[in-house]
Amino acid sequence: MARVYATGKRKTSVAKVWLEPGNGTITINGKSLDEWLGGRETLKMRVTLPLDATKQLEAVNIVAKTFGGGVSAQADALKHGISKALVEYEASFRAILKPLGLLTRDARVVERKKYGKKKARRSPQFSKR
């Protein structure tokens, strides 16, 4: 099987993911998963969730590039990209990943600031006198 490409997104983060048969190596922005996320164990678990669900943790290699947003949003974008790549790699994985909600793009983004407001919805403090 050849390399498979997928794009994952979350907030303003984008993850470009290449998946190929291998021994379970995960490389993000030229670093290993542990190097990239440091001691953030929950984010590491979030990234590897699609691989755990499909039991492909030791069977595929992942090379990814992430940009935009923060570390947490990048991790979620990576999770989305890995899920999409796994479905393209093996169509039967869709039945496993879809019920877990891993193929759905999380559409929540920051609301824009409106004029006359301090933030998106916060009004300036009212002064009676």
Image (spheres, helix red, strand yellow):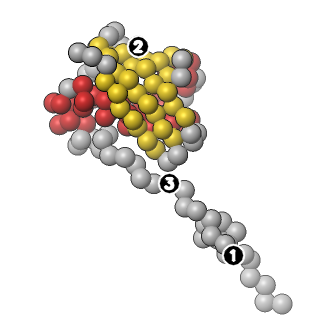
Q: Please identify the residue farthest to the bottom as the structure is shown.
A: 129
Amino acid tagged 1: Gly
| Of callouts 1 and 3, the N-terminal one | 3
In the picture, the disc for residue 25 is 2
Is the Cβ of the residue at disc 1 closer than 8 Å to that at disc 3?
no
| Of callouts 2 and 3, the N-terminal one | 2
Amino acid tagged 2: Thr
Residue at 50% from the left image edge and 48% from the top image edge? 11
Q: In which quadrant is the N terminus drawn?
A: top left
| Of callouts 2 and 1, the N-terminal one | 2
Residue at 30% from the left image edge and 41% from the top image edge? 103
Residue under pointer 1 = 116
Residue at 32% from the left image edge and 10% from the top image edge? 22
Amino acid tagged 3: Val
| Residue 5 coordinates in the image, percent (x, y) | 34, 27
Q: Quadrant of residue 116?
A: bottom right
Closer-to-camera residue (111/35): 111
- Give the Cα separation between the discs numbered 1 and 3: 21 Å
Residue at 28% from the left image edge and 20% from the top image edge? 56
Is the Cβ of the residue at disc 2 closer than 8 Å to that at disc 1?
no
Around disc 1, counting alpha carbons within 10 Å, would you say few (fewer than 14), some (14 to 19), or many (20 or more)? Answer: few
Residue under pointer 3 = 109
| Residue 31 coordinates in the image, percent (x, y) | 54, 17
- Give the Cα separation between the discs numbered 2 and 3: 31 Å
Q: Quadrant of residue 50?
A: top left
| Residue 91 coordinates in the image, percent (x, y) | 18, 30
Q: Is residue 34 visible?
A: no
For mark 2, give the secondary structure: loop
